[in-house]
């Protein structure tokens, strides 16, 4: 489970988690529907009250092209207390969510339905969703390096992970890459042409999303301080 800030104007704390199991002998054959959740655990009266699914935005998963998938809005209640994504049969969440720069990363695993004894094959995918709305958030990914033209298609919310194996992925690493300053001017007269404008924040700062064995992914994020708190 992971926690995060709630949407603007709401109290409480956002909780990010998912359902699924891959610990028991019969788990590979389990095709029960599993779900990714983001729930605002705010102030409730009484505190024992539950949060019904009808108060959460509902998404389904749909193929885009190849292994890229998107999330499709299915229900959007007024004053929603979060969102959830229903996964296809057999797919499950058995890892740890990670929230960074307004995106929640959630790895999922789909094992083969047939148990092969001591080991079971399967494949991994990684969801990248807007932490507050649940919308797709992987369209701006660059594979391999920030300058790469290898990107998923527009609207991508889930990408396949080629880890070189079939074990489930549990951890997602997110690391901000320090912004590099422009090289200093050398001696001599000032340039006749004014220097270029500063790089836009979206293109100037990157975070690297990594999963063991898989190709690194890079996402732009706003540079500089995004919020502050005054202490009196």
Image (cartoon, grey):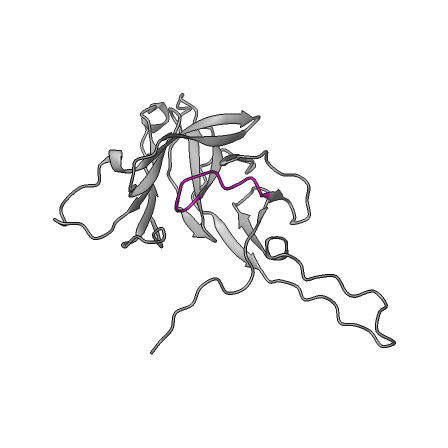
Span colored in magenta: 130-141
Rendering coords of residue 95 (x, y %): 39, 42
For residue 128, side relative to residue 76 (left or right): right
Q: Is residue 191 magenta?
A: no
Quarter where residue 188 is shown:
bottom right
Q: Can residue 22 be seen at all in this image of the molecule? A: no
Number of numbered discs visible in the structure rendering: 0
Choose top left, top right, bottom left or bottom right for residue 227: bottom left
Quadrant of the rendering where the C terminus is positioned: bottom left
Residue placed furthest toward the top = 114
Q: What residue sits 13% from the left and 46% below the top?
A: 48
Quadrant of the rendered structure where residue 31 is?
top left
Who's the residue at 54% across and 38% down the image?
Answer: 163
Q: Main secondary structure of the magenta part?
A: loop
Vertical arrangement, residue 42 with respect to residue 169, above or below: below
Q: Position of residue 43 (x, y in %)?
A: 20, 53
Does residue 93 appear in the picture of this structure? yes
Residue 69 sits above or below residue 16 on the image: above
Answer above or below: position of 13 versus 163: below
Q: Residue at x 24, y 51 (%)?
A: 42
Give x and y (percent) for residue 44: 18, 50
């Amino acid at each position: 489970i992971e926690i995060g800030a709630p949407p603007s104007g709401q109290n409480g704390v956002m909780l990010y988690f998912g359902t699924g199991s891959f610990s028991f002998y019969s788990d590979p054959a389990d095709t029960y529907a599993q779900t990714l959740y983001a729930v605002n655990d705010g102030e409730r009266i009484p505190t024992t009250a539950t949060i019904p699914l009808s108060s959460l935005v509902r998404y389904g998963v749909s193929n885009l092209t190849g292994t890229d998938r998107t999330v499709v809005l299915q229900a959007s209640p007024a004053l929603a207390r979060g969102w959830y994504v229903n996964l296809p049969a057999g797919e499950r969440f058995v890892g740890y969510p990670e929230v960074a720069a307004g995106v929640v990363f959630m790895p999922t695993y789909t094992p083969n339905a047939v148990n092969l004894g001591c080991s079971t094959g399967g494949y991994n995918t990684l969801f990248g969703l807007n932490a507050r709305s649940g919308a797709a958030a992987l369209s701006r990914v660059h594979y391999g390096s920030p300058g790469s033209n290898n990107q998923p298609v527009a609207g991508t919310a889930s990408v396949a992970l080629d880890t070189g194996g079939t074990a489930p992925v549990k951890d997602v690493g997110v690391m901000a890459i320090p912004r590099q300053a422009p090289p200093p001017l050398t001696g001599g007269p000032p340039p006749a042409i004014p220097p270029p404008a500063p790089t836009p924040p979206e293109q100037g700062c990157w975070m690297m999303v990594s999963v063991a064995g898989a190709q690194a992914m890079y996402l732009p994020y706003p540079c500089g301080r995004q919020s502050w708190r005054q202490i009196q």
